[in-house]
Image: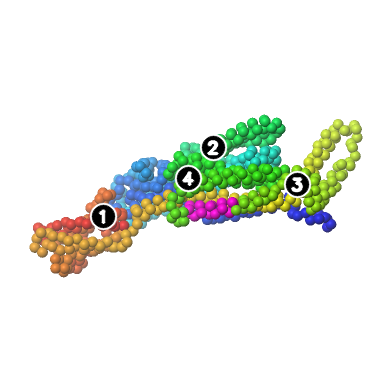
Amino acid sequence: MSATAPYAGPSPIRRPVAAAALLAALLSLVFGLLLAGAGPASAHAALTGSDPQDGAVVDTAPKEVTLSFSEAIAVGDDSIRVLDPSGKRADTEAEPRDLSEGSTVRYGVALHSGLPDGTYTVAWQAISADSHPISGAFTFSIGAPSETTVALSSQEAGGGPVGVVYDIARYAAYGGFVLLVGGSAFVLICWRGGASALPMQRLVVRGWLTLTAATLVMLLLRNPYTGSGKFADAFDLAGLQSVLDTKPGAALVSRLLLLGAAALFIAVLFGTYARREDEQERKDLTFGLAVGGGVVAAGIAATWAMSEHASTGIQASIAMPVDVAHLLAVAAWLGGLASLLVALYRTPDIGSAAVRRFSAVAFGSVVVLAATGIYQSWRQVGSWSALTGTRYGQLLIIKVALIAVLLAVAWFSRRWTGRLTDTSVASSGAEVTSSRAEVASSGAEEADAAAEPEDTAPTAPDEASDDVAPERAAQLARQRAVLTATKKKRIRDADPERSGLRRSVLAEAAVAVVLLAVTTMLTSTEPGRTEEEAAGGATAATAPAAGPVNLSMPFDTGGRNGKGTVRIDIDPGRTGSNDLHVWIDGSDGEPMDVPELKVALTLESKDIGPLPVVPDRLAEGHWTASGVQIPMAGDWKIDVTVRTSDIDQVTIDKNAKIG
């Protein structure tokens, strides 16, 4: 730019570069927050109980170990392993048996007979019904606790470097779907001229490439993601075959097949359709592309619905089509927004009519999102406490807030759209205002000066005209096209209404990037409803008692001085080791010695016991026993046998909640 040239604002070439750099930086920040704060994918099915329970001490070795879950899971041969204190397998290494009944999901593995006393470790790993891996471990003891050499990996299923790459691919797949579907819909519905615009073609094709590449990565990493966590297992053919036999694997393969049909759709859209000039033929082709493209887009969306949250839980048959509608509305809105941003920054020909048509499409998408989102929120959260007290609910609140911000920015975009005119584009050489005329004039002078050597160049000799003329004509045509595009771009960039619209749409796109990241995090987070149900089940099964158990039981052996009261304290009154104290008071309230005292504990609901306890006499009327093992929580029956003479004896009992 010369010293005397008027300043025409930032270079139109630098603006899209700056916008792209801003979006890339924002995307990197979102990825950083996503990967730093999310950790491994949260479990969507949760362990709600086990038999034996975590930390339980059983008197005799159980025949099997059973685990209960909050929702359906997929298991394999090594999904449940029981390891003895030395680390050797204590189970029969057979595939877990499905013991589910009704809504209760339970699996069990048989144990070897004659297991020695000691502490045993139960390690489990499975895949929840919504495709996410889950794992965990706990211990129980036979006879008494002991040292154990078992060392399990601290890495959760779905974590580690494989989990990070898989989560990135998951995010990229959603982004590619949004660009592919939203960009195609924008061209067909809002701006048919965009079919011949190279930036629009690149946007849709890049969306297709991103979705295809991400799907292939997820398919290859599915086996190590749900299993070993090692990249080397991505090309294990046996593991890949096992993945193809699962619901998530079938969904990924179906998505790849549908992407093949999408490639044909793109070829027709930017090939045959873009070249059609007859209006009737173009209308017929538009209808065919809309129907075919809609079917393919719905099919791709269904690959998520059939393998993730919507496919499990309550009302799955309703939730899956609702989820498809939700995904399509997201793509139409956010993908159309990205297309509008590209069109405003990279193409000079988009007019106000196309912007207004997109505004109507965006409004319809928001209505669909509101209706489907309310249903999905009720289904996945279920209560106000889950909305505010679970990670899923908190992310949902953030998503709603981002949508509100996006709608507020969109309101400003609609104001700019209302003031938008096509004058600056339709009349590329017209002078709209004095400032625009100055910009257009300076741009034309610079362009003419650049082209002058070509225009005034001498004509080639006649004998060489056959070879030079076609090349020369093509060169001149390219120069004229560049000059025309440059003039249109300068005039477009000088339009304050169009510049204001570009800025507001860029702000919308920035919020949309964050919104898409939060949506992806929601798909890898346990729904609030199941998290609360799992926590409730675990609390009911393992909640500790409020304190020591105190019992008082009157007795009468029928003989002389055969009446009295037995008082029992069990401290701390929880599973594991406890101290037992027994006091016997006579009918006069004074401590009373008896020749024999026995205690037994029975958990009838689990067919455990009676577990005998023989306390030692500590003082007159006071007996005690330490290290009394309570193997699991429950409603225990306490039997006390009191003998007051050689022939006078009675057994009394009372139930107590322990553990």
> Counting residues from the N terminus, which is met first, the one under dot 2 or under dot 1?
2
Q: Is residue 123 above or below residue 614?
A: above
Question: Do the CB atoms of the residues marked 1 and 4 lie less than 8 Å apart?
Answer: no
Question: Do the CB atoms of the residues marked 4 and 2 lie less than 8 Å apart?
Answer: no
Q: Describe residue 117's horizontal placement relative to residue 647 as left or right.
A: right
Q: x and y percent of residue 119 in the render?
A: 34, 54
Which contiguous range is marked in magenta?
391-407
Label 2 to label 1: alpha-carbon separation = 56 Å
Label 1 to label 4: alpha-carbon separation = 40 Å
Identify the residue under disc 1: 636
Of the two numbered discs 1 and 3 in the rendering, the one whose residue sits closer to the viewer: 3
Instruction: Using the image, tell me which numbered label, if any, was put on residue 424.
Output: 3
Q: Describe residue 502's horizontal placement relative to residue 108 as left or right.
A: right
Q: Residue at x 59, y 51 (%)?
A: 407
Q: Describe residue 407's horizontal placement relative to residue 421 as left or right.
A: left
Query: Disc 2 marks which amino acid?
Result: Gly
Label 1 to label 3: alpha-carbon separation = 86 Å
Query: Disc 1 marks which amino acid?
Result: Trp
Q: x and y percent of residue 632 in the render?
A: 31, 54
Quarter-wise, where is residue 182 in the image? top right
Report the magenta stretch's main SS: helix
Q: Quadrant of the C terminus?
A: bottom left
Crowdedness near tag 1: few (<14), some (14–19) or many (≥20) residues, C-alpha within 10 Å: many
Of the two numbered discs 2 and 1 in the rendering, the one whose residue sits closer to the viewer: 2
> Counting residues from the N terminus, which is met first, the one under dot 4 or under dot 2?
2
Please, what secondary structure does the residue beneath circle 4 have? helix
> Counting residues from the N terminus, which is met first, the one under dot 3 or under dot 2?
2
Identify the residue under disc 2: 299
Query: Front-most of 580 and 62?
Result: 580
Identify the residue under disc 4: 309
Query: Disc 4 marks which amino acid?
Result: His
